[in-house]
Structures are given as structure tokens and as C-alpha cells.
Image (cartoon, rainbow, N blue to C red):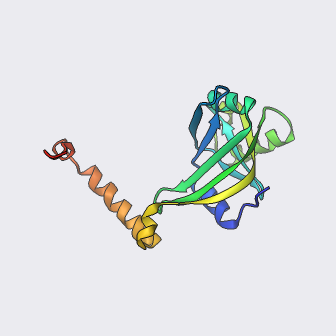
Amino acid sequence: MAVLTDDMKRVVRAQRLGYVATVSADGHPNVSPKGSVAVWDDDHLVFADVESPRTIRNLGTNPNVEVNVVDPEVRKGYRFSGKATVLRAGDQYWKAIEHYKSEGADIRRVRAIVIVAVENAAPVVSPCYLTGLAEEEVAALWAEWHRKAKDKTVVDLIPPNDF
């Protein structure tokens, strides 16, 4: 079991959006965004099955899972891998439902709860940091890119002649 550090917990709590990777019975990968990723305890993450039939089906045949949570502003985060358990009833299920309800989630849409026993955790860091940039500089670069992207016109999207 991997112990989630305070920084890992901070990133998960701040972002909530995680990308969950599973493998289908025929070996094909499946990555699905989950807006309900949360810290369950020092060794577990949790997410709700709202519209995740493929993810839940895949976990039924192969409980191995990876969850990536990245702060898009600073391009850093964590990847968590481990084994998932799908819950549809029981004490842990209802505790998770109450957690989401207390945060204002529409629990009527929750079909199941998935608890991930984290076995390995590792940082995800953008290669842009290899240039020596600080987090503040990376955040400023992406903010500028987004600001400029909003001002683009169709002409800006035409590739140059030598493309």
C-alpha cells in the first residue's frame, strides 16, 4: 500500500478531476475523466460512477486501475495505481454517498462507488520544467496561451505555406 502524502491529498482535493485508466476484457485501454475523484483515507482514493458503464465493466474483469490527477495551471500532479473495488451497497458505499451529498453532489445519479487501494504513487511533471522554469513561470505561460487562444480568428488557424 502506498501512503498518500499531504501534497498528493492537496492536489486531489484541489482538482477533483482525475483521468481513470482501465483495461477491457479484450485488452483495450480505456481512459475516462471522473469529476468526483476524492481522497478516501491515507491509502485510498474514491470516485463515483455517474455515467461510467465501460469503466465499471472493465473493473469487473480486471480491478487494476490508474488514476491521474494533474493541476493544469502548473502542469504537475500525480499518478496513482492500484486495485479498485466497486461498491453498490454497504457501510463504505453509504459513507461515500454521504460525503458526496455533503459537498452538494446530485447523488441520485450515482450508480456505484469505486474505492481505489493505492499501491503506487508517482509524480507527473511536465517536461517544460526541464528548461528550469519555476511553477509561477509555467502558470504564467499557460495563462498567456489561453488568453491569446481566445483572441484567435480563423485566419490565425491557417497553417503557413511551408507547413
Name the residue: 64% across, 66% down: 7
Task: Identify the image quadrant of the N terminus.
Answer: bottom right
The residue nearer to you, when weighing 37 against 138, is 138
Name the residue: 63% across, 47% down: 67
Q: Is residue 122 left or right of residue 98?
A: left
Name the residue: 24% across, 51% down: 151
Q: Is residue 156 left or right of residue 74?
A: left
Residue 19, quarter of the rendered image: top right
Question: In this picture, is 126 found above or below 104?
Answer: below
The residue nearer to you, when weighing 26 against 78, is 26
The residue nearer to you, when weighing 19 against 10, is 19
Image position, residue 111 (x, y; %)? 70, 30
Image position, residue 96 (x, y; %)? 76, 44
Question: In this picture, is 109 found above or below 84?
Answer: above
- Could you tell me how many numbered marks the image carries? 0
Task: Identify the image quadrant of the C terminus.
Answer: top left
Image position, residue 109 (x, y; %)? 65, 31
Q: Is residue 68 left or right of residue 84?
A: left
Q: Residue furthest left?
A: 161
Question: In this picture, is 36 found above or below 122?
Answer: above
Residue 83, quarter of the rendered image: top right
Q: Residue furthest right?
A: 91
Residue 61, quarter of the rendered image: top right
Image position, residue 47 (x, y; %)? 68, 43
